[in-house]
Image (spheres, coloured by chain):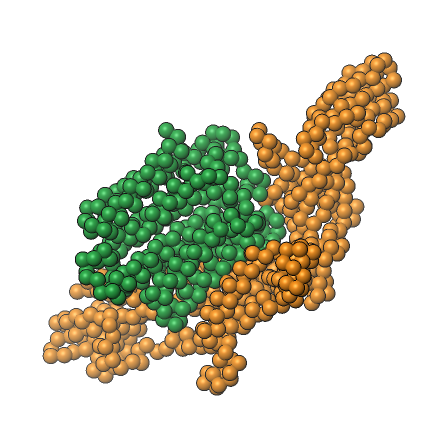
């Protein structure tokens, strides 16, 4: 058993659990959610083992480093961050239907990592600039934030879906009937954004410290840095709008989606469309 | 406060609407600099966007937009907004924290949402001390006051957490102050002292030294105040040919004395007298650093020589030169050496660059190395503001945690006699996460009996 087989099983598990959660959303059979959760947990343990094994394998190859160094590894790690966050939400809020809006993110990240063209799955040695312990701190903090924002974006969509169903006065047994109350979704979205914001801030800070250690400039307005700041501004506005102007509901839901688009662009868009210090992330 | 509110400028900067607007505008305009390449020569913009557009961009400072007058202006507005907003609200928070919470009409407490009433058959004084010791056992430090028909107890936790958000605001300002202190432009134009803070670079060929560097933005020469020498530079490769590490062996020389000898790599710089040297690039040359040692006499020759030139070393009694090279890009992998001691046929052989070869000649053995000459490219920075930035960053994380995850919680207990029994009204309040606090409040009071 090697790491890519384990991660392959993970991809499959996330596909299955996504399917079960979508089925739960459609058929509202509680058992489907339980199966979905079980598969998710198994998948996540497989993934943890896979990541650990990949780390170990890199040492076997004599180039030991944490599996966080290129697009493939970061996508896998992104999925790895989304899943426990979502499991925590499901257990805390006792609402398994959240999986319908969270697990597909994890699956798509894994599938994209495994099947997209131009994504190198090899364990490759680290270029000198990446050889730093700050690598782990920076990537881990950023991706916990990204994971939370992905879930917040999913919750935002959930909110808008439920809201529009209510507006069209669909009966409670329609598709959205199984979704939690609007107030509960709103509260979850907000708390998730708060959590993500703290980690994004930490991610930007660890990146700045690392940059200063590596070349004496903690901030250089590189596109990725700038986009992470743009993302930070968006969530900062969201939090201010809520705390001081009492925004909630649809407006926060839309902002959570806008925020996630910014996260998505910071993560992917910058690598594909803009050049800069983080361009090695594209490989 | 009310007087300040009349001042329209103050009111403008105190508004949260301005904060939201600025955050939005900063986010939106920041995008420009990620799409339009920055710091290119004017020709680039003319070629890419046409002459008129390029001129407009020049006026708006787009080629260096994050330092443009309007972007810095936005950041100034943002700072003013932060300062005024915080100054406007901190006195209110101060008042809330220092409020006398026992100076309250107990009848009004009943209207609070988080509450629980308990009835006991006991003496009033006993119940008061029971309630007090119960609260103490739960980590609350109650005060009490006689309210005529009953006794009111009050305890609070984390009143200072109300400052969390202002810690975050202050942290941003401290980061800005750090950025200003560490800015080469500010050092040059305002402090009139370019050596106070700078960012620059220098190429030092192996065996050479320098006592100044060149600033990034102006190309100006900046004296270091000491001398730095590059003893050698080396690149290590992975088996697949990828570079593994660039490293420079450096010596710091002050007043003619060698005070520090160290080796730097990418991510592991050298700091001396507040100036940090980062390994950033390199430059291969055509010349070679050659070292020859006569094993018989122990005499050593070390110098930089050009290829295809005959070198005479009188002390060692030999003549040598580099006839040819085998290159991989700009990097020399092998060199062909010609070596003679004027006895018999000269030796001609290939050796790997940087490796030592032992040459056996009628006159004795010689150890020979030839290494391509490199210059190490160092990025050099002096940033006296960086600790402000770091402190600001730390404060921000701390402030965010306080602001998001901690709250100001209060508990009142009103003990009074009614119909021959003692009734205790417990009331709680929290400024954040009210649901969570309500749950904890009831869990705690379940233990009270």
Residue A50, percent across and down?
38, 36
Residue A84, percent across and down?
34, 47
> Based on the displayed image, in which of its 4 quarters is residue B377 positioned?
top right
Q: Is residue A68 left or right of residue B437?
A: right
Specify the colour of chain A: green
Q: Nearer the viewer, residue B216 or A276?
A: A276
- Can residue B389 be seen here? The reply is yes
Residue A149, percent across and down?
39, 55
Residue depicted at x 23% and y 83%:
B148
Residue depicted at x 27% and y 70%:
B428
Residue depicted at x 75% and y 51%:
B212
Q: Nearer the viewer, residue A64 or B261?
A: A64
> Based on the displayed image, in which of its 4 quarters is residue B435 positioned?
bottom left
Judge whether A272 appears above or below B105 on screen.
above
Q: Locate the N terminus of chain A by quadrant.
A: top left
Q: Is residue B393 left or right of residue A246?
A: right
> Based on the displayed image, in which of its 4 quarters is residue A240 positioned?
bottom left
Q: Nearer the viewer, residue A92 or B73?
A: B73
Residue depicted at x 36% and y 35%:
A8
Specify the colour of chain B: orange
Q: Nearer the viewer, residue B246 or A23?
A: A23
Judge whether A265 appears above or below B336 on screen.
below
């Amino acid at each position: 058993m090697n790491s890519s087989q384990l991660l392959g099983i993970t991809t499959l598990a996330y596909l299955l659990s996504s399917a079960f959660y979508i089925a739960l959303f459609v058929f509202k059979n509680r058992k489907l959610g339980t199966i979905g959760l079980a598969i998710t947990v198994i998948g996540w343990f497989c993934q943890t083992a896979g990541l650990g094994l990949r780390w170990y394998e890199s040492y076997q190859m004599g180039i030991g480093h944490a599996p966080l160094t290129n697009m493939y590894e970061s996508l896998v790690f992104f999925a790895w961050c989304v899943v426990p966050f979502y499991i925590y939400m499901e257990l805390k809020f006792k609402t398994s239907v959240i999986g319908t809006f969270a697990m597909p993110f994890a699956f798509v990240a894994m599938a994209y990592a495994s099947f997209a063209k131009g994504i190198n799955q090899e364990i490759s040695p680290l270029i000198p600039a990446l050889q730093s312990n700050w690598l782990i701190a920076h990537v881990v903090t950023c991706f916990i934030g990204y994971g939370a924002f992905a879930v917040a974006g999913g919750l935002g969509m959930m909110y808008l879906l439920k809201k529009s169903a209510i507006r069209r006065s669909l009966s409670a047994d329609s598709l959205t009937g199984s979704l939690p109350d609007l107030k509960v979704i709103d509260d979850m979205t907000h708390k998730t954004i708060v959590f993500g914001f703290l980690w994004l801030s930490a991610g930007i800070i660890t990146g700045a410290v690392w940059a200063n250690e590596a070349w004496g400039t903690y901030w250089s307005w590189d596109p990725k840095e700038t986009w992470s700041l743009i993302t930070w501004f968006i969530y900062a506005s969201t939090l201010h709008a809520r705390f001081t102007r009492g925004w909630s509901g649809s407006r926060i839901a839309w902002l959570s989606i806008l925020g996630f688009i910014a996260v998505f662009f910071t993560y992917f868009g910058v690598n594909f469309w803009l050049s800069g210090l983080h361009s090695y992330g594209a490989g | 406060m009310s007087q300040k509110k009349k001042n329209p400028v103050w009111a403008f900067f105190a508004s949260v609407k301005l904060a939201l607007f600025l955050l939005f505008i900063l986010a939106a305009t920041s995008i420009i600099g990620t799409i339009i390449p920055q710091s290119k020569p004017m020709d680039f913009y003319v070629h890419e966007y046409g002459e008129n557009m390029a001129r407009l961009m020049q006026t708006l400072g787009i080629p260096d937009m994050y330092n443009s007058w309007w972007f810095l202006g936005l950041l100034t507005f943002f700072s003013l907004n932060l300062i005024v907003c915080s100054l406007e609200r901190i006195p209110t928070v101060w008042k809330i924290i220092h409020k006398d919470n026992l100076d309250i009409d107990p009848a009004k407490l009943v209207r609070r949402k988080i509450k629980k009433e308990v009835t006991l058959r006991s003496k009033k004084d006993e119940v008061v001390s029971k309630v007090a010791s119960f609260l103490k056992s739960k980590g609350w430090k109650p005060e009490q006051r006689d309210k005529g028909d009953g006794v009111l107890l009050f305890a609070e936790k984390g009143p200072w957490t109300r400052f969390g958000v202002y810690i975050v605001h202050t942290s941003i300002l401290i980061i800005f102050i750090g950025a200003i202190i560490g800015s080469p432009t500010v050092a040059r134009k305002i402090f009139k002292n370019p050596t106070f803070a700078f960012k620059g670079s220098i190429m030092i060929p192996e065996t050479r030294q320098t006592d100044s560097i060149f600033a990034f933005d102006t190309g100006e020469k900046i004296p270091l105040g000491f001398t730095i020498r590059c003893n050698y530079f080396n690149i290590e490769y992975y088996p697949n040919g990828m570079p593994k590490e660039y490293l420079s062996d450096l010596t710091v020389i002050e007043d003619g004395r060698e005070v520090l000898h160290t080796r730097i790599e990418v991510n592991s710089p050298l700091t001396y007298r507040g100036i940090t040297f980062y390994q950033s690039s390199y430059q291969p040359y055509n010349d070679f650093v050659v070292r020859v040692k006569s094993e018989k006499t122990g005499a050593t020759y070390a110098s930089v020589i050009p290829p295809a030139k005959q070198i005479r070393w009188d002390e060692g009694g030999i003549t040598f030169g580099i006839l040819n090279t085998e290159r991989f890009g700009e990097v020399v992998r092998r060199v062909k050496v010609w070596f003679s001691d004027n006895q018999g046929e000269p030796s001609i052989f290939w050796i790997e660059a940087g490796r030592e070869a032992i040459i056996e000649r009628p006159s004795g053995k010689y150890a020979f190395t030839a290494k391509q000459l490199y210059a190490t490219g160092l990025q050099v920075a002096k940033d006296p503001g960086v600790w402000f930035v770091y402190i600001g960053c730390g404060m921000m994380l701390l402030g965010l945690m306080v602001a998001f995850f901690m709250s100001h919680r209060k508990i009142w207990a009103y003990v009074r006699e009614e119909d021959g029994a003692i009734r205790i009204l417990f009331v709680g309040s929290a400024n954040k996460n009210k649901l969570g606090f309500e749950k904890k409040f009831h869990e705690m009071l379940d233990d009270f009996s």
